[in-house]
Image (tube, coloured by chain):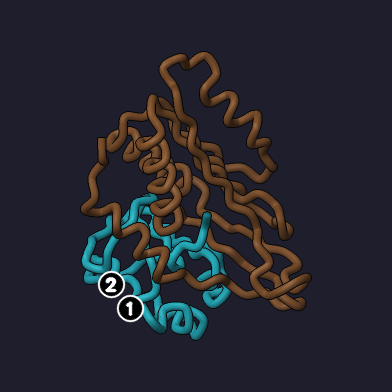
Chain colours: A brown, B cyan
Amino acid sequence: MIKVQREDFDIGVELAALSQGRDNVGAVASFMGLVRDVAGPGALSAMTLEHYPGMTERQLEQLEAEALARWPLDRVLIIHRHGRLLPGDRIVLCAATSSHREAAFEACAFLMDWLKTKAPFWKLEEIDGKSSWVAARQDDEDAAARWQNNNQSE
Amino acid sequence: MKVLYFAWLRDRVGLSEEIVEPPVDVATVGELIAWLAQRSPGHGEAFADPTIVRCAINQDYAKAHERFNAGDEVAFFPPVTGG
């Protein structure tokens, strides 16, 4: 399931719903990303996430389908917020459920690595009253690249 | 055709979207970038380094050699930084 939204989310409610009534599920792995003050205590006043409506949903749906094809999963959840967020605010939640933990752990890491390099979001940081766009990181590219030739481990 | 700009490309171009009619010999993403870069100083600044500009045709990623059609939605944006 994909949700692209301005509103906050409740991780407990979301994860409970994911495995509700699914007796074959023995593992729920999740990752939650928060707005971090990169510039030291009190320096970051806000972070605005811009996205490309339509393409974002399309890319995340492809990501979900890819994870479901690669691992023996029951369900996948990706929630990503947009708009102006404050330090400590929740940005993203990825979760995968499966019979066993290995598939759930791996799929969750895959979802985040690919999301970071494929989902059309851009971060604008406000630091000391100045706004600047966050530059893409090479190590995010490297983390995503490891899944290119790396098929699932059963 | 409709062209969309996001993040710092939008800031530099000064528009979030525009309708353009490139000449018929502009057929690929790379050619479109070169043509758009001539439209204004802002466009020129946005496309100054085409290697750091990403493109999507109809909301799917497209490389510089790929062709677009007259009715396509073509978007330009920086490398993504979500998550």
Label pair 2/1, CB-CB below 8 angstroms: yes
Query: What amino acid is labelled 1 in the image?
Result: Ala
Question: x%, y% of residue B71?
Answer: 34, 52
Residue under numbered circle 1: B34
Is residue A8 left or right of A66 when viewed as pictured? right
Inter-mark Cα distance, 2 to 1:
6 Å
Above or below A126: residue A19: above
Q: Depth check: B3 or A42 in front?
A: A42
Above or below A42: residue B48: below
Q: Classify residue B37 by image quadrant.
A: bottom left
At numbered mark 2, what does the secondary structure look like: helix, strand or loop? helix
Residue A139 in view (yes/no): yes
Q: Depth check: A133 or B29 in front?
A: A133
Question: x%, y% of residue B78?
Answer: 45, 68
Is residue A80 left or right of A145 when viewed as pictured? right
Question: x%, y% of residue A109?
Answer: 42, 48
Residue under numbered circle 2: B30
Query: What amino acid is labelled 2 in the image?
Result: Gly
Above or below A6: residue B11: below
Q: Residue at x 41, y 34 (%)?
A: A101
Label 1 neighbour load within 10 Å: few <14, some 14-19, many 20+? some
Above or below A27: residue A43: below
At numbered mark 1, what does the secondary structure look like: helix, strand or loop? helix
Q: Depth check: B29 or B25 in front?
A: B29
- The subunit carrying tag 2 is B
Residue B1 in view (yes/no): no
